[in-house]
Image (tube, rainbow, N blue to C red):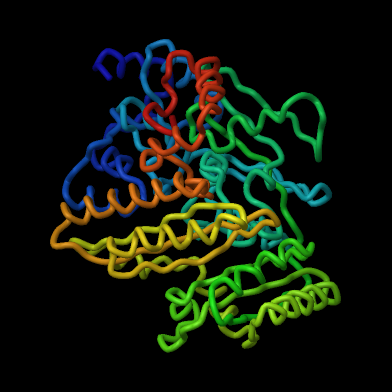
Amino acid sequence: MTPNQIQQLRQAINPQRIVCDKDELARHSHDCSPLAAIRRRRGNQATCPDLIVQPADHQEVSTVLAWASSNQVPVTTWGAGSAVTGAPLASNGGICLDLANLNQTLEINRENLTTRVGAGKLGGELEMELNEHGLTLNHSPQSLAQSTVGGWLSTRSSGQMSSRYGSIEDLCVSFTVVLPSGKIIGMPSAPRAAVGPDMRQLFIGAEGMLGVITDVTLKMFQIPEYRTFESCYFPDLNKGLSALQHVMQSGLRPFLLRYYDADEAPHAMVDPQFKHPVLFLGCEGPEHVTKAEMATAIDICRHHEGQTMGGRAVKSWMKRRFDFSGIQRIIDKPGGVAETIEVCHYWDGIRNTYNSMRAGLKPLADQVVGHFSHAYPQGVSLYFILSGCAADDALAEKKLLNIWRVAMETCIQTGAAISHHHGVGLLRRQPARTYLGEAISVLEGIKQALDPTGIMNPGKLI
């Protein structure tokens, strides 16, 4: 941005909303990805906004976008910077639109079981507010405490309870979005409607490339009456996958289903001697129904040669399920290499993806462990966690980029979805074009129609 453009923007909106402090610009130049941690340590600030705007409401968002469109200035929306693929980074400079001030809880409707909040609302804060009323979101990404509601929609996020309650696209009722032209659009709101296409889906997962979501109406739930947990180990990986598939295709909906391979199971069980793949199960709801659901799930596991061990290990995991400190300690060390990559496939393809990706990633890290979560009747997500070290940060960065290349190439080769819930951003941008295939022309057409000057989060997704 030129000095003249910055002065024009100061005249267009309250100048107190504009931040040019170098430390703040640096903070808004890196997300929470391991790659960003290495680049920050190396002093590599390859992506940096020219300034930060912190609007107070969607009218100010509208003013900023209308001005930016007229002046062809890039705008990149920032929630809490907790993304791990580079989606909120201002790779073309311009304006970083920080939604931290849009953090109010606007409504809690107990009769409809909905809540409306500003897009900058932190998920952990909202969950605690609802808990005080005996309510819950039932959306629990590991980043719950440090991610925003708007960020959930923009990256099409999922949570640890998705097998029962769905992902963010299932939990979102409606939202307000500001288009690049500055026009404010309130999406229709109803339990369900058949009035043309569901236009919400244009913006959920669009990573800010089509507009800025400013407030969101979400479903909420009463805190369940009863919960029960069980763990079950299997003689080999395939037996447990068959049990997981059987559970989901039987009509059962446990709120917790996490299946760890033999390499990750010792970490999940907090027992270095544990050597079997292990399934964590959790059911909740009315007591009699919940007990029956768990009993049926256990019967299915035993049918596939599973052996139950009680719920103690699962309860322990529930207490630490938001803890990312182990990976963070590796990332914080010079030369530390750590990464998490989540993909998704149908049941008839997930084994091949697991075996191929594990074989490809093994030479690239000291430890490669995996688990399956976010299960559906049709398939399941696969999550690999890698850790290791390199001689220095420069080599660690090269290793991470190579890890991503191998993982994405494996997905394309095996037909898996290249992302389940972390979005695309910069790290998945090239394979996204291959994965979307001919459908990318539809996305490009929508982008051209809504953002003809191309100001919204340029360089991402497509």
Measured from the top left, where is residue 123 in percent x and y? 56, 53
Between 236 and 420, the one lying in front of the other is: 236
Check the image and name the residue furthest to the top.
70
Side of 101 relative to 73 (left or right): right
Which residue is pictured at 50% across the width and 58% down the height? 352
Residue 131 to residue 300: above or below: above
In the rendered image, which quarter contains the N terminus? top left
Side of 18 relative to 246 (left or right): left
Between 311 and 438, the one lying in front of the other is: 438
Side of 283 relative to 120 (left or right): right
Which residue is pictured at 64% across the width and 61% down the height? 161
Which residue is pictured at 42% across the width and 18% down the height? 454
Which residue is pictured at 36% across the width and 70% down the height? 326
Measured from the top left, where is residue 420 in percent x and y? 53, 50
Residue 207 to residue 127: above or below: above
Q: Where is residue 356, by image quadrant?
A: bottom left
Q: Where is residue 243, by image quadrant?
A: bottom right
Residue 354 to residue 158: above or below: below
Residue 279 to residue 46: above or below: below
Check the image and name the residue furthest to the left.
391
In the rendered image, which quarter contains the C terminus? top left
Measured from the top left, where is residue 386 in percent x and y? 35, 63
Disc count in the image? 0
Measured from the top left, where is residue 335 in percent x and y? 19, 61
